[in-house]
């Protein structure tokens, strides 16, 4: 099979530009984002001066990934507070910018609650804004720490399931530092295996319809010097049949109380393939992605993306002569074609070998085991 070997230079962060950062220039505080819609062609930053700009960045996927959306949402509330905008209005707009990822609303609530608590204690607007910003920064730190612990737990699990190393891991969508305050979720586990000399191959699904595997995961793997190979989503079955996959590692946008996992569309078929071929299917996600208020997969609101993302192709931000009006890309389907374009699908818990969190590994995946992990996390946070 054709392989892509990235250069084996120093192991460093995928980019010198962080995915998100808070800055305070003389003209006022801003939230600076690495525009992920422009990758891998170019590294360009977006500067958000208000919540409405951030909402648009979230909807356009300039900033994305469940953990990072939570961080962005918290900073968005702080930005509104510091700049004197209506905090309640900003919180509502941010929390509903994308419906499936639970972390977004959680991050918004955390900063908003800190803001309200400061006001309730008699603080002025400046003190309340400082409280919101402190909450956002704390969430950012916690996510980085959670990422490191998930990587440690994940590599330990891989070594237990697949003794001897030489892991060939298939991943879907993008789960590295572009979605996290640290080095990511599922990608962080693969990266830890790479550093330990136990990763033989990272199989990267291109991940339709937005090619977040091809554009972003391959970008991160190349920067890390990892041995990786890109494949079309519908080629995964051939890999399983050839015995070329030792484990599947994916992230999650929401995990329900019963252990159902919502992730980028295409994850569920991988779970079915993995079960048939007796390959571990492992979900890596922080405890903040577990939503005990959503009982099961059928209760998840699955975001529907615009049809032109399927009926057109476009290079990241590249001007295209004669491009179609709807999405700015080149049509690959007849004009007027309707497209079914869900952003996510849902994998039932019985197809999930394990869920790796910063608080440990849940396997088998049951409602009781997930509830215990969440309770453990709450004890650590409040203890």
Image (spheres, helix red, strand yellow):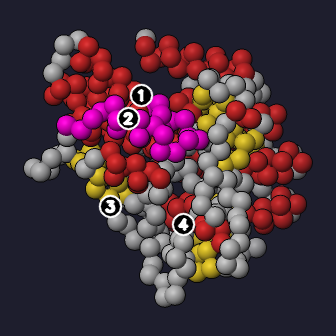
**Residue labelled with disc 3:** 45
Q: Residue at x 84, y 48 (%)?
A: 272
Position of residue 313 relative to residue 347, above or below, is: below
User: Which span of residues is magenta-colored?
Assistant: 84-107
Quadrant for the C terminus in the image: top left
**Residue 11 coordinates in the image, percent (x, y):** 45, 57
Quarter-of-image position of residue 367: top right
3D distance between C-alphas at marks 1 and 2:
8 Å
- Mark 1 = which residue? 109
Marked residue nearer the N-terminal end (4 or 1): 1
| Image marks 1 and 2: residues in contact by CB distance under 8 Å | yes
Quarter location, residue 282: top right
Secondary structure type for disc 1: helix
Depth order, front residue of 78/45: 78
Are the two marked residues, 2 and 4, in contact with CB atoms closer than 8 angstroms? no
Q: Residue at x 26, y 13 (%)?
A: 120
Spatial CA distance of label 4 from label 3 is 17 Å
From the viewer's side, name the closer residue of 97 and 42: 97
Q: Any mark on residue 91, and which? A: 2
Structural crowding at the residue carrying mark 4, measured as other residues with C-alpha within 10 Å and reported as few (<14), some (14–19) or many (≥20): many
- Residue lying furthest bottom: 321
Name the N-terminal-most of marks 2 and 4: 2
Is-magenta flag for residue 248?
no
From mark 4 to mark 1, how far is it between C-alphas? 31 Å
Labelled disc at residue 193? none
- Disc 4 designates what residue? 215
């Amino acid at each position: 099979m054709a392989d892509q070997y990235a250069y084996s230079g120093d192991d460093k962060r995928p980019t010198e530009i962080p995915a998100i950062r808070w800055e305070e220039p003389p003209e006022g505080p801003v939230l600076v984002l690495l525009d992920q819609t422009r990758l891998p062609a170019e590294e360009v930053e977006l500067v958000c001066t208000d919540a409405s700009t951030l909402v648009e960045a979230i909807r356009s996927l300039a900033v994305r990934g469940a953990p990072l959306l939570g961080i962005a949402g918290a900073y968005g509330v702080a930005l509104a507070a510091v700049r004197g905008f209506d905090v309640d209005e900003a919180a509502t707009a941010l929390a509903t910018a994308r419906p499936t990822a639970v972390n977004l609303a959680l991050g918004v609530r955390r900063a908003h609650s800190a803001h309200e608590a400061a006001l309730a204690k008699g603080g002025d607007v400046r003190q309340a804004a400082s409280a919101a910003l402190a909450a956002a920064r704390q969430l950012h730190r916690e996510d980085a720490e959670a990422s490191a612990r998930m990587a440690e737990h994940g590599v330990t699990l891989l070594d237990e399931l697949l003794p001897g190393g030489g892991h060939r891991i298939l991943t879907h969508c993008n789960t590295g530092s572009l979605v996290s305050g640290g080095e990511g979720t599922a990608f962080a586990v693969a990266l830890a295996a790479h550093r330990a000399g136990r990763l033989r191959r990272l199989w990267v699904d291109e991940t339709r319809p937005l090619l977040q595997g091809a554009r972003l995961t391959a970008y991160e793997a190349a920067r890390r010097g990892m041995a990786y190979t890109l494949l079309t989503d519908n080629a995964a079955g051939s890999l399983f049949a050839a015995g070329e996959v030792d484990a599947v590692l994916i992230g999650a946008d929401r995990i329900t109380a019963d252990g159902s996992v919502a992730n980028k569309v295409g994850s569920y078929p991988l779970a079915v393939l993995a079960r048939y071929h007796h390959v571990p299917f492992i979900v890596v996600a922080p405890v903040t992605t577990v939503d005990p208020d959503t009982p099961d997969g059928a209760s998840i609101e699955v975001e529907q993306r615009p049809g032109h993302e399927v009926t057109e192709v476009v290079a990241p931000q590249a001007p295209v002569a004669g491009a179609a009006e709807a999405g700015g890309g080149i049509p690959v389907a007849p004009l007027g074609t309707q497209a079914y374009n869900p952003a996510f699908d849902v994998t039932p818990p019985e197809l999930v070998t394990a869920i790796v969190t910063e608080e440990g590994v849940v396997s088998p995946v049951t409602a009781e085991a997930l509830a215990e992990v969440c309770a453990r996390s709450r004890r650590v946070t409040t203890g």
